[in-house]
């Protein structure tokens, strides 16, 4: 297969695969590094490189799950609180092998939408690299990430655009969006 055919195949196979379909198999640090490295090749106006990523694995990931559950519980009026949603927050994070926070850093050099678009393209590169490595992944942007400012050490000119979940899957062609 030539490069164009390989690229077309990867693009056509790219999809969101959710944590419920992840196995317990660990993603190697080498593959995680490759996924994040591919993100840095996204086009970005004036070379602002507006993406900031933080990897959560192991104990840090468990703390993130607990913190997000606490934020959800504290931010919901009692009559809107859903035990299922509370449990799902912890399940998804804990089931993923790695979770990456997606932060945009606004430089002030270009319009904010351009930096959000650059970060989005960086995440698309992550999706494609996951696909090429048979890693399931998806980008989620729950409102509660707005409350993670301290744990993500988000600065005044930054905003969390969501979390990128990754996990090994047995059959890459299962489940999708």
Image (spheres, rainbow, N blue to C red):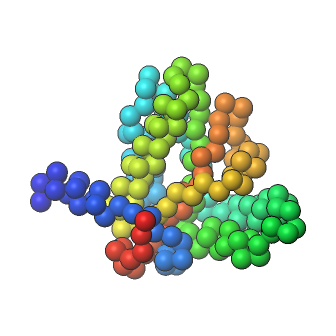
Image position of 132 (left or right of 49)? left
Asked whether residue 100 appears in the rendered view, the answer is yes
The relative height of residue 68 versus residue 154 in the rendered view (above or below) is below
- Which one is in front, 18 or 85? 85
Among the 4 quarters of the image, the one containing residue 59: bottom right
* Quadrant that contains the C terminus: bottom left
Report x, y in % for residue 105: 59, 34
Among the 4 quarters of the image, the one containing residue 57: bottom right
Report x, y in % for residue 24: 52, 78
Image position of 90 (left or right of 20)? right
Give the farthest residue toward the top: 109
Count of numbered circles on the image: 0
Give the farthest residue toward the front: 79
Report x, y in % for residue 62: 70, 67
Asked whether residue 27 appears in the rendered view, the answer is no
Report x, y in % for residue 46: 44, 22
């Amino acid at each position: 297969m030539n490069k164009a055919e390989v690229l077309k195949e990867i693009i056509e196979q790219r999809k969101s695969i959710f944590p419920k379909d992840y196995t317990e198999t660990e993603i190697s640090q080498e593959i995680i590094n490759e996924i994040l490295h591919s993100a840095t090749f996204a086009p970005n106006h004036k070379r602002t490189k507006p993406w900031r990523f933080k990897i959560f694995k192991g104990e840090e990931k468990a703390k993130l799950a607990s913190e997000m559950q606490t934020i959800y519980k504290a931010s919901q009026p009692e009559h809107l609180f859903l035990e299922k949603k509370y449990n799902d927050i912890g399940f998804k994070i804990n089931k993923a092998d790695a979770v990456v926070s997606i932060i945009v850093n606004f430089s002030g050099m270009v319009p904010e939408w351009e930096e959000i678009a650059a970060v989005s393209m960086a995440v698309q590169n992550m999706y494609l690299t996951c696909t090429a490595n048979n890693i399931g992944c998806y980008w989620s942007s729950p409102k509660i990430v707005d409350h993670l400012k301290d744990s993500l050490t988000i600065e005044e000119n930054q905003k969390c655009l969501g979390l990128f979940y990754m996990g090994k899957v047995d059959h890459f062609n299962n489940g999708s969006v």
